[in-house]
Amino acid sequence: MKKFSFKIRGHKYDVEVVSHEKNIVDIDINGSQYSVELDHEIKVKKTPTLVRSAVHTHKPIEKKKAAGGDLKIKCPLPGNIMQIMVKAGDKVEVGDKLVMYEAMKMENIMQAEKAGTITKVLVAVGDAVLQDDVLIEMSIS
C-alpha cells in the first residue's frame, strides 16, 4: 500500500502499511510484521460519494454517403434481423420499408429516406447485428 522511511535516534526504519481496517493497521517494519491500534478510529463519511460516468446520447440512424452516390444503411442499435422486405435490384421510394429488426425487446422498422435502387443486402433473417453494422447498400437515383 504505502511506504514510509523514518529516522529515529539515528536508526533508519522502512515502514510499509500492509492493510488497514477501522483503527487496526498491519505494518511491516524492516521485514518484521506488526499489528498496531490507532489512538482514534478514522471517521468514515456517512454519505457516499457517487462518481457517474459520462452520459452517452443515442446516435441517430447513420446513413453515410459513400463515393458514387451510394448509401450505406447502418443499424442504430444491436439486435436481431426479423424480416427483410427488399432484395438486390429492387427500386425503393422514400418511406418504403426495408428491414424489421428487434432491439431491446422492441420491433423496429427501417424505412428508406431517399429513393434509389438496392445494390446489396448484407444481412439475412435471424442474423445478430451490432450497432453501426451496414445492413443494406443502395444507389441513389
Image: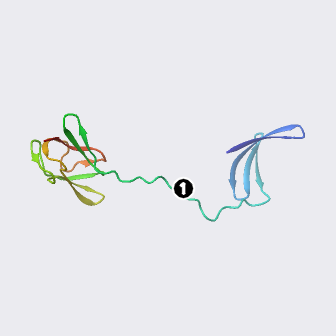
Query: Circle 1: is it few (<14), some (14-19), or many (20+) Cα within 10 Å?
Result: few
Question: For the residue marked with disc 1, what is the amino acid?
Answer: Val
Where is mark 1, residue-wise? 51
- Residue 67: give x, y in percent of width and height: 22, 34
State the residue lying farthest toward the right.
9
The residue closer to the viewer here, 25 or 133, is: 133
State the residue lying farthest toward the left.
90
When the figure is inspected, residue 102 is found, relative to residue 116, above or below; the finding is below
The residue closer to the viewer here, 54 or 100, is: 54
- Residue 28: give x, y in percent of width and height: 74, 44
The residue closer to the viewer here, 129 or 8, is: 129
- Residue 127: give x, y in percent of width and height: 23, 48
- Residue 84: give x, y in percent of width and height: 15, 51
Horizontal placement of 117 versus 56: left or right? left
The residue at the point 19 percent across, 34 percent down is 68
State the residue lying farthest toward the top.
67
State which quadrant residue 138 falls in: top left
The coloring applied to the image is rainbow
